[in-house]
Image: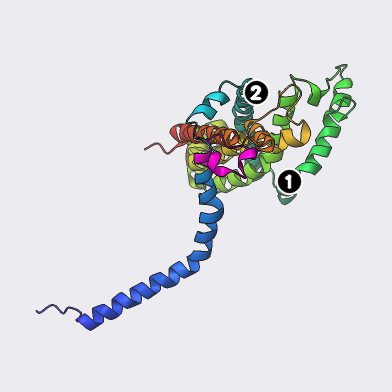
Amino acid sequence: MVALTPSAPTRARASRRSRRTTLIAWGFAAPFVILFLVFMAGPIVASFFMSFTDLTTRDLQTPFNVNVVGFENYAKLFDDPRFLRSLLNTAAFVLVGVPLTMALALAVALALNTGISKFRTVFRVGYYAPVVTSIVAIAIVWRFILQPDGLLNAFLGWFGITGPDWLQSTTWALPSLILMAVWRNIGTLMVIFLAGLQGVPKEHHEAAMVDGANAFQRFGSITLPAMRPTLLFAAVITGIGYLQFFEEPFVMTRGGPLDSTLSTAMYTYNQFGFGNYSYASAASYVLFLAIVVLSLIQFRFLGRKD
């Protein structure tokens, strides 16, 4: 049998059709690609190179006078006590906030998935409402709760405990912001965990119940392993969000008292405001490196185990 091969005109038409399809596809993608290159990729690359210069506000009119200083900005960062304090505050925010948020969100998701049958939708909306609420509105409510004569101290007073001025205490200001952030972000992880729980096969739980496994044993042996990808996703997005925490101290404490709530993102924002553009760029890339390291650690411990 003789194999039939396309003729030269046929191949040429197919090639023209393929090129035309490619051009049409690039035509639809061009607006996004152009906007991404101009407003995202370009500034990212520029800021990276800027972190190795001494660019400040006074150099904007004479950009050719900017000098390349190498890693001098990075060295100055780690010699700055305020920047080191911001790193410590951010690390505490992440190390306490991420596990606490995930644990409470998983508990709420478990209750809504199995334990609560009546008014389930109402509870879901209630837990998710803080996520879509303005941080300004949240700040007003939490300031009322945490002020010296606020609701929290009034509640403690019923038990004979004199509460502190939470947001003006160097000891309690950061834990107060962590508590507020956990409360605000539970709703997001609750929705994610609910989706993960509904993907766990019920047959596995039924088989374990037949074998005599109790609820805790089923949770540890079936639910958690099946939800490993969901837990990884939740840990990564929460860790990235908490490493960049900015709104809470900016609105509630302005980084005080005595820098006890100063975050790395807020420190970087302040440096941009002071006109230290190259120094602020270096700080932002230190924060980016911290995000990469944290994500790699989370993938190492929560990634799929083959």
Name the spot of residue 28 as percent of width and height, x first: 49, 69
Amino acid, disc 1:
Phe
Q: Disc 1 or disc 2, which is closer to the eye? A: 2
Q: Which quarter of the figure is the N terminus placed in?
A: bottom left
Relative to 72, is 85 on the left or the right?
A: right
Mark identifier at residue 264: none
> Is 265 part of what is drawn in magenta?
no
Residue at the outermost left position = 1
Residue 2 horizontal/vertical position (percent):
10, 79
On screen, residue 95 above or below 118:
above
Q: Residue at x 20, y 79 (%)?
A: 6
Q: Is residue 106 visible?
A: no
Query: Foreground residue, 100 or 240?
Result: 240
Residue 295 coordinates in the image, percent (x, y): 50, 36
Magenta stretch in the rendered image? 47-65
Taking depth in this image into account, of 169 and 194 the one nearest to the observer is 169
Residue at x 56% of width, y 53% of height = 39
Q: Total marks drawn?
A: 2
* Residue wearing tag 1: 123
Q: Quadrant of the C terminus?
A: top left
In the depicted view, which residue is nearer to us: 129 or 181? 181
Residue at the disc numbered 2:
82
Which element is circle 2 on? helix
Q: By what rule are the colours in the image chosen?
A: rainbow
Q: CA distance from mark 1 to mark 2?
A: 42 Å
Q: Earlier in the sequence, mark 1 or mark 2?
A: 2
Can you tell which quarter of the image residue 284 is in?
Answer: top right
- Could you tell whether 140 is left or right of 120 in the image? right
Q: Quadrant of residue 180?
A: top right
- In this view of the protein, which residue sits in the foreground, 175 or 243? 243
Name the kind of residue labelled 2 in the image: Arg
